[in-house]
Image (cartoon, grey):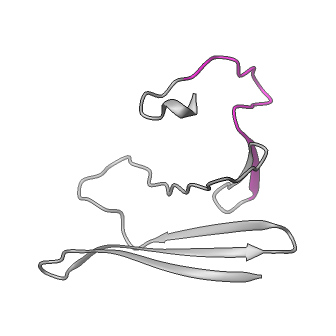
Amino acid sequence: MSKMIMYFEKQDMRTKEVSEKATVHITLDQDFKYVKFDVDLDSIPGDGLDGYEITPTFDAIDFDNNQTFYTDSNGLAMQERILNYRTYYNFTEAWADSNHPEHN
């Protein structure tokens, strides 16, 4: 197993004050062939943000996961997810996102 820790911070170049911090723990497990990302935020950026959810976004180039990925269910269990598939309904409707036309 290998582990990397990355530190990010946003700093005002004029005052040198750090306003936002994040730490990303990346774990590589060769036996189980998975990569785990844990993101810790020092604080939520901005004042007066009520009802917002902060989510990290990662892009993997030339990575084939057979449209299957796993998410953590609030620390309770890992949930298998399959892109555009639900067991409880037929997912046939075309979806378009004008901000990301390649993701139709």
Place of residue 82 in the rendered image (x, y in percent of width and height, measured from the top left): 75, 40
The vertical placement of 57 against 43, above or below, is above
The vertical placement of 4 against 97, above or below, is below
**Residue at horizontal 74 percent and vertical 31 percent from the top:** 85
* Residue 104 on the magenta segment: no
Q: Is the magenta region chiefly helix, strand or loop?
A: loop
> Which quarter shows the N terminus?
bottom right
The vertical placement of 82 against 76, above or below, is above
Q: Is 71 or 57 nearer to us in this picture?
A: 57
* Left-right relation of 29 to 21: right
Q: Quadrant of residue 74?
A: bottom right
Place of residue 96 in the rendered image (x, y in percent of width and height, measured from the top left): 52, 24
Single out the residue that lies furthest toward the left: 14
Place of residue 7 in the rendered image (x, y in percent of width and height, measured from the top left): 45, 79
* Left-right relation of 86 to 18: right
> Which quarter shows the C terminus?
top right
Single out the residue that lies furthest toward the right: 31
* Left-right relation of 40 to 67: left
